[in-house]
Structure formats: structure tokens, C-alpha cells
Image (tube, rainbow, N blue to C red):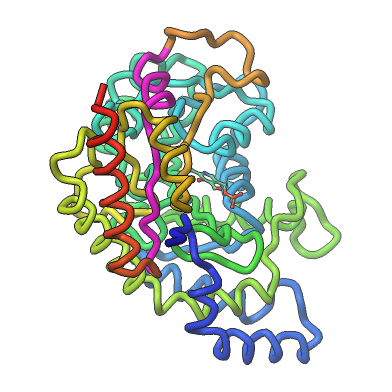
């Protein structure tokens, strides 16, 4: 039985007619960039998050760029962040000429360790970027002693409650595989702060206000109208999809009990973007599951401090991030999984360890 990490065709089959009606409307309108659909999506997402400001942008990466720009971060500045994330978290910092400084993770949550982050704060540190990795809220309260602005990278935690309560800015990704996915690239910045919202908007359109008068050098970070219209169709389904993800995660807790896998804990607010276990003999398990057409992924095989584009990091610097890279495996948890598919993943994992032992 095939079990994919995603099933966007199944999602489309369920809501295709609603989406097509909106796509046709936008195409017929002749207006393809920003506009009322984008403004409405901003209002709706802000209301859902219980925050006053939402700024739609062209991707999660661009949301990070805009948030960093809004905070005035640039050459000479340092930004402390986790070594265990998708590249964009650190890439955006470096892209603006600032230096990403990598801290280690908490081995239980895989999220940025506040103690490790605080130990890396210097006079040059201008912000901290924790990531709500795999949909689980990072420990933001633990970062308070730094008294620095926090950008919450919530690319993987769209729909989680409490975003932006502590962070100065929150960045979301609507990459198609995310909990709320566009039909292409899209992202968003959320904030409580009117001034930061204003600066984010300015950077989104080449720093221009009004058109053709440029106050700062930003970029084209605008959201397409079509993506906003599609996201507006999907948004009301998000809470249900996230509940389904959680139900799948809880099902795995039963199906995988007694295996040598270390399972991720359920926690209030966890939106289960990924279900990531630690697995003995991870690569063999992955190959075994692949043979049974069960798709898995390693998020992420090389920690950020060891990426070739960030010289200076070496093996042993951040031992928990490095150990996680060797041990983690994401099992399918998307909302369109059937009970039979979940069962098949559970049975297959149990068979793998029953055959080969667990060490
Ligand atoms: C943690 C994290 N940050 C940033 C991004 C960047 O988002 P995007 O792909 O929309 O640019 C992603 C996802 O791809 C992500 O998982």
C-alpha cells in the first residue's frame, strides 16, 4: 500500500470545485498581483491569530527577509538561531549581510535550546530566531533574559495558537506542503507592532511609498492574487486538518508503542507539521519502508552550522543537532491518511524491528 508524506491530490479532490471557481474569478478579473483577495487574506489570518497586523508576502523565506529588514538587521549584526531547521531560517540572515550564529537544540523537542541560545548572545546580537519545528512551539519564554527581539519562524506551525504573543514578528510559509499550502510559493508576516508592520509593508514593495518614491531598498516580496484566493478557500479547513494531523499522531502513539522508536510528545498547540521519531538503524528502516512504498524523509540530514556556505562550523560544535541529524525520521502524518495507511506504517515499523533487532 502506497503511503505518501503528502497527498495534495486527495486534498484537491475534496475541495477542487471551490478552488477552481475562485481561480476562474481571479483570472477573469485581470488583476493578478495583491489586491482585495490579498487584503482579505491578511484580515482573516490576523483575526485567526488574534493579532492586529498580517502582511502577505511571496514565500516563507521572503517573510523572514522582510521581518529581518523591518528590525533593521544588516551587515555587522548577529542573529542567534537553531542549527536544526530548513536552510531558509539562516539563509535569510546571511542574505542581508548579517551573521547567523547557531545554537544547539533541546534533544526532546528538537527546538532551539534557550540555554544554548543565551550563551551565544553578544553585543552584536540583534535578534533571535527560534523555529517552531515540526509544528511544536519553541520555548520562547526561556529566551526572555536576552531582552532581544524574537522572530518566530512559524513556517511549520501555521494555525498554532499563541503565535506572536512573545515574538516581535512571526513568519509563516504557505509552501504547498505546509499545513496551509498555496498552489505555489507564498508566505506571511504577523505582528502586534504597528511600526514593524508598517516597515514590513514598505520593504515588501521595494521600499516605495507612494509608488516611485523609494525610502529604503527592499525587494519585490508581494503575494500573487491567485495564491491569496486559493489560500482563502483553504483557510477555513485548516483547524480541521490540524486536528486530523493530531489524531494521526496519537494513533501512531498506539501503533508504534513497544518499538524502539523515540516518539514525539503531544503538547498543547502542537500542529504536527511532521511526525518525527528517533530511530535506531534509521537508514535501514527508511530503506525497508521505501520498499513497502511508505515515504519518509530526514529533516534535516546536515545541521546548518555544518553547511558548506557557512564556514567555521565543525563536527562536535553542536552535539545534539548533529545526533538528531543522524537519528531522525519523519513518518507520514498528513490529514488525508486513512486508518489502513496508518496501520500499515505501524505494522511495517514493528516488522522491521522484530526481524532485525533494535541495535
Ligand atoms: C522552518 C522553515 N523556515 C522557512 C521556510 C521557508 O519557507 P518557503 O519555502 O515558503 O520560502 C521553511 C519551509 O520551506 C521552513 O520549514
Which is more toward the observer, 201 or 220?
Answer: 220
Q: Position of residue 98 (x, y in %)?
A: 62, 25
Q: Position of residue 338 (x, y in %)?
A: 34, 69
Q: Position of residue 214 (x, y in %)?
A: 80, 52
Residue lying at 63% horizontally and 81% vertically, measured from the top left: 36
Q: Is residue 301 shown left or right of residue 344? A: right
Q: Position of residue 38 (x, y in %)?
A: 61, 74
Q: Is residue 197 shown left or right of residue 309? A: left
Q: Does 114 appear above or below 208?
A: above
Quick one: which residue is furthest to the right in this view? Answer: 212
Q: Quadrant of residue 210?
A: bottom right
Task: Please provide the residue range marked out in magenta.
Answer: 318-335
Inspect this view and state whether residue 240 appears: yes
Residue lying at 33% horizontally and 53% vertically, measured from the top left: 345
Q: How many marks?
A: 0
Inspect this view and state whether residue 150 appears: no
Q: Does 128 appear above or below 36?
A: above
Q: Quadrant of residue 27?
A: bottom right
The N terminus is located in which quarter? bottom left
Amino acid at each position: 500500500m502506497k503511503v505518501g508524506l503528502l497527498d495534495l491530490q486527495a486534498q484537491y479532490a475534496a475541495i477542487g470545485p471551490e478552488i477552481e471557481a475562485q481561480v476562474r474569478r481571479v483570472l477573469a478579473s485581470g488583476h493578478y498581483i495583491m489586491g482585495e483577495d490579498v487584503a482579505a487574506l491578511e484580515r482573516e489570518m490576523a483575526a485567526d491569530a488574534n493579532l492586529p497586523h498580517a502582511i502577505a508576502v511571496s514565500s516563507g523565506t521572503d517573510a523572514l527577509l522582510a521581518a529581518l529588514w523591518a528590525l533593521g538587521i544588516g551587515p555587522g549584526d548577529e542573529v542567534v538561531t537553531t542549527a536544526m531547521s530548513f536552510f531558509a531560517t539562516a539563509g535569510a540572515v546571511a542574505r542581508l549581510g548579517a551573521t547567523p550564529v547557531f545554537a544547539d537544540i533541546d534533544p526532546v523537542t528538537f527546538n532551539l535550546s534557550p540555554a544554548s541560545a543565551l550563551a551565544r548572545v553578544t553585543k552584536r546580537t540583534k535578534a533571535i530566531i527560534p523555529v517552531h519545528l515540526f509544528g511544536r512551539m519553541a520555548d520562547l519564554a526561556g529566551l526572555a533574559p536576552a531582552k532581544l527581539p524574537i522572530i518566530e519562524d512559524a513556517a511549520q506551525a501555521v494555525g498554532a495558537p499563541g503565535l506572536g504573543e512573545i515574538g516581535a514578528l512571526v513568519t509563516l510559509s504557505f509552501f504547498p506542503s505546509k499545513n496551509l499550502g498555496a498552489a505555489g510559493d507564498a508566505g506571511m508576516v504577523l505582528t502586534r507592532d504597528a511600526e514593524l508592520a508598517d516597515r514590513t509593508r514598505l520593504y515588501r514593495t521595494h521600499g516605495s511609498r507612494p509608488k516611485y518614491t523609494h525610502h529604503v531598498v527592499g525587494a519585490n516580496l508581494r503575494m500573487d492574487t491567485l495564491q491569496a484566493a486559493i489560500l482563502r478557500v483553504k483557510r477555513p479547513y485548516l483547524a480541521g486538518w490540524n486536528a486530523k494531523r493530531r489524531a494521526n499522531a496519537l494513533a501512531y502513539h498506539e501503533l508504534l508503542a513497544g518499538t524502539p522508536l523515540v516518539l514525539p510528545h503531544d503538547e498543547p498547540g502542537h500542529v504536527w507539521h511532521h511526525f518525527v521519531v528517533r530511530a535506531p538503524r534509521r537508514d535501514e528502516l527508511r530503506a525497508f519502508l521505501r520498499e513497502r512504498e511508505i515515504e519518509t524523509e530526514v529533516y534535516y540530514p546536515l545541521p546548518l552550522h555544518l553547511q558548506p556556505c557557512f564556514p567555521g562550523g565543525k563536527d562536535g560544535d553542536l552535539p545534539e543537532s548533529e545526533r538528531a541529524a543522524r537519528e531522525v525520521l519523519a513518518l507520514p502524518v498528513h490529514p488525508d491518511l486513512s486508518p489502513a495507511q496508518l496501520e500499515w506504517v505501524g505494522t511495517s515499523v514493528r516488522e522491521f524491528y522484530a526481524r532485525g533487532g533494535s541495535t
